[in-house]
Image: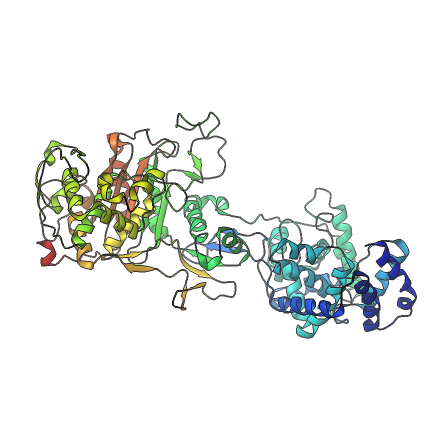
Amino acid sequence: MSNRPLAAAGRLVPLLRAGLIAGIVIAAAAYPLVALTGLGAKATAHAVDQKTRVLKTALPAETSYVYGPDGKTVLTMFYEEYRQYTKLSDMSPNIQQAIVAAEDSRFYQHHGVDPKGVARAFVSNARSGGSQGASTLTMQYVRMALRDSATTPKEVQEATQQTSIRKVKEMRMALDLEKELSKEQIMERYLNSAYFGHRAYGIYAASEIFFSKTPKDLTPVEAATLAGLVKSPSEYDPADSDQKEATGRRNYVLDRMSQLGYLSPDSAAAAKSEPIRLKLTTPPHDCAAVAEKYNSWGFACDYLKNWWSAQPAFGANRLERMDNLRRGGYRIVLSLDPKIQGAAEKSVGAKEATGSPFANGIVVSEPGTGRVKAMAVNRTYSLDLADNPQSSNPEAGPKVKANYPNTVAPLLGGGDLAGYQAGSTFKMFPMLAALDSGMTLSTSFNAPYRYRSEVYDGWSPSNASGAMTGQQTMWSGFGKSVNTYFVWLEEKVGADRAVRLAEQLGLRWRTDVDRDHASPDKAKKWGAFTLGVSDATPLEMANAYAAIAADGRYCEAIPVQAIMNRDGTPATYATPGGLHREVAKPRCRQVVGADAARAATDAARCPTGDTPARGSCGGWSTADSVRGTVGRPVAGKTGTTDSTRSAWFVGYTPELAAASFISDPDNPFNAVGDGQSQIPIKAVSETLRDGLKGTPTRQFTPPSDAIVG
């Protein structure tokens, strides 16, 4: 406080000693302060009125909870301030009485400002030059509410700066607030806003962190301990090895509770003789804190964060959306299915060790909704990379750690990693584009071992085997993965059309090379697109194939089945037409005709050893063990890259679509080898089998005669 306000306060001492009524005390105190700063009364009233409107609706930051699909199992939390809003009826009277005793013994007598407290503070400060406060619980709540509702650093500073003007405004707002809210409402808001130390904001967090219980169960000793913290959480921290200061402060509160009639003298004395018994709890925070039992769910949690940061419903930009996640008090239920997730984890864990440089991952998506049902990879979700070996990439520096066994990298998709070359799984896109453009499954071509493409400037791709040479249709060409057939087919439909269709099915180009080839002026010449030279993620591929299983209806990938606001209502977003839709609801659109999708599925039954409804697979296929393992109708496609640097399989039934890969995320030139190419096939087959065990078998809908040809 400057010298001039101190002098002014000193001149008011005789008036204050006279015991003037509250209105006169406040007016006498406020007037010289306002006048000395040149702030007009009209401007002050306007500013206060604005802030009062904010205070009526201001809600403190609240923790967002992430639940398993049962809606009950807490997987983790997101918070800037760990807090869960609690109704006064769910708080013990002990904590209400203790906070009054500790902070504002005349709370139920004054109307927002305590004239006796103001007089005492002014007199004391004028005599000693100190800064004794006179803040009531209502005034303290005003300060906290202004802080919590602040949207700029300036507003935060204005809410907390130690100035006479701020204090005067605080008094005025406290008086106004008590005309609008009852004492019980103010008490509830105060106890939900106060900071108790150890990242505990509000009484729910304080009760849990210090005593591992709810506010309803606090004893007088526990309540007094917590109430004593508000004045100075660090000075009176009971978690310190020396509890002397904390015990002294607690005993002061217990004495005040006795003096105010909340405790009998004997009860207060008995309580003071007790030691402070803590039962400390550290609440989980962010995805790295997911319990060990659910460690593999950390990758789905990480995907949730990335998905959330892209949703306009939660803010104008990434920072605002993440701030909203950590402060908004949402209740988020993941879409993972424990049975399917368990099957996926078992499969990838058995195929490739956690300590392998090769990542074997799988994503399972639900056709018709886009909901992610499983995300698993042979890695431990952890920020601790201390024991990871050096990266297998020879171009990486000597201090660069590998991504195994621990990582938080989004290896399965949903983040900023480009993914992995997906090989012949991309043949689905030109085939589907051809079918949707009017071509038939019987479209035939005498595919040579090597094919020279004039459309693609003399490019001459070849097949993996001479056994693929000969007359092929979409069924046999897809089942055997005949490169030359699909280059020819792509010429007929147009590579650009296949590229645009892949984009409509959710694929994104994240490398400079892919973006360049996919550009409108170059896509027509991207002949190698059908061979899967572009990077893709398992999340994208599972969701793209899920659209084919859903008769051509593409649904955006989504990691949740429900998102509730802090008031229990579903989180929504505004559509361009002005309607409000739930954020967690599927967002689907028809990308290709249903008959084209059914025809593509009929051809895609050939690689798996299944029997198509209409055509012939040509005698053999690339993954003929899949049908026997899954034990129900199944379609899909294998994919490998040059020198088998990565291997893929994407498979689907009417109920689920799954994409699995194996590759070295650190070094794409570290080839997995032909011997490893069966791993994704087995991962998808076993996951579909075990994930669907006990569910009714559904059949694929056959394509029409017109599209069979």
Q: Is residue 572 above or below residue 559?
A: below
Name the residue nearer the viewer: 529 or 115.
529
Is 358 in front, or is 455? 455
Q: How is the image coloured?
A: rainbow
Can you tell which quarter of the image residue 547 is in? Answer: bottom left
- Image coordinates of residue 46 in percent, x first then y, are 69, 69
Q: Image quarter for residue 157?
A: bottom right
Give the mark count.
0
Residue 68: give x, y in percent of width and height.
43, 54
- In the displayed image of the protein, which residue is found farthest to the front? 521
User: Do we see residue 698 in this rendering?
Assistant: yes
Relative to residue 354, is residue 212 depicted above or below?
A: below
Q: Position of residue 451 (x, y in %)?
A: 13, 35
Can residue 117 be seen? Answer: no
User: Which image quarter holds the C terminus?
Assistant: bottom left
Judge by depth and name the residue closer to the eye, 659 or 97: 659
Q: Classify residue 329 as left or right of residue 693.
A: right
Is residue 700 placed above or below 570 in the rendered structure? Answer: above
Q: Is residue 225 left or right of residue 6?
A: left
Q: Percent from the top left, x then y, of residue 625?
A: 18, 41
Left or right of 576 on screen, residue 18:
right
**456 over 255 or under it: above or below:** above
In screen coordinates, is 491 left or right of 308? Answer: left
For the N terminus, the image quarter is bottom right
